[in-house]
Image (cartoon, grey):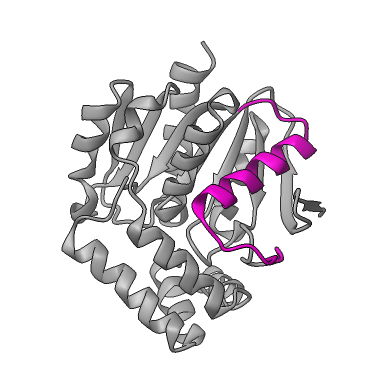
Amino acid sequence: MPHIRTRDGVQIYAEKLGSGNTTIIFIHPPGMGHVTFKQQKPLSSRYSILLMDLRGNGKSSVGTQQITFSLLAQDIYDVMKHFDIKSAILCGYSNGASIALEFALRYPSSTKGLVLVGAFPKVNSLLLYAEFMFGILVTKLNAMPLISFVIGRAHAHSKGYGKQLESYIRKTKAKTLHKMYNEGVKYDRTERLQEIKAPILLVYGKKDFYVHHYQKEFRHFHRNTDVVYISKAKHQVPTKYAKEFNSVVSSFIRRKCEV
């Protein structure tokens, strides 16, 4: 599969599947890489889908610039240009949803819709803050085996997939992951949600209680926001509840993005 060169010479690993008129671009959380969305590949029977490793993650190079969500959004835009994608549905998971938000703010004409899974426009809950602090501490200590094990096990729908994800996370350098966690914990675009014109779908696991309150902020600032809860799920919706998630994504696109 190809590596796409960004405007500053960074090599971004990307896979494009399917040939539908509508394109979905999947944006993973820090460290997890494009294998996060392995079970979303069946959507390519109806849509074009783009899976990629963010700068410094997985098989993508890191470059010399300071990693910011604005820079990562710029990379996504460069990949879109390479594939001649004019506009797309951005699907971001967890902190990847924040990167999708940044893309929509920077490139509104290229954003057809947003699917945000376990999303938060800022970190303002104690449990979420504690998760970021754990990531920041562990990566500062260069303890990649620990954090890869924790994330891989949490997302494992099977033993084999858990091992694959754990191995893939270790491709990312601790220094890069540390920068991404620091960027994520300070990121806040709450009041700028009103600037987004594209429809938004929020997908939360019904048991992912500590992020449910964020839907109020989205709905307050962005009137065209829908919310769907996945029954029995916690945070790991795309990996552990892929069938339900894929169905929800398809329904949203038909209702809001293909009219």
Residue 81 colored in magenta in the image = yes
Residue 108 colored in magenta in the image = no
Q: How many marks?
A: 0
The answer to whether 95 appears left or right of 161 in the picture is: left
In this view, 212 is above or below 147? above
Closer to the camera in the image, 59 or 8: 8
Judged from this view, the residue extending furthest toward the top is 259
Q: Is residue 5 visible?
A: yes
Q: Residue at x 52, y 56 (%)?
A: 68
Closer to the camera in the image, 76 or 40: 76
Closer to the camera in the image, 192 or 236: 192
Q: Is residue 158 visible?
A: no
Measured from the top left, where is residue 182 in percent x and y? 40, 67
In this view, 199 is above or below 145? above
Q: Residue at x 79, y 57 (%)?
A: 9
Q: Quadrant of the N terminus?
A: bottom right
Q: Residue at x 39, y 51 (%)?
A: 237
Judged from this view, the residue extending furthest toward the right is 2
Measured from the top left, where is residue 215 in percent x and y? 23, 38
Quarter occupied by residue 204:
top left
Measured from the top left, where is residue 248 in percent x and y? 42, 33
Which region of the structure is painted magenta? 59-87
Quarter occupied by residue 247:
top left
Measured from the top left, where is residue 19 in percent x and y? 74, 30
In this view, 250 is above or below 103? above
In this view, 51 is above or below 177? above
The answer to whether 197 appears left or right of 70 in the picture is: left
Q: Residue at x 70, y 65 (%)?
A: 63
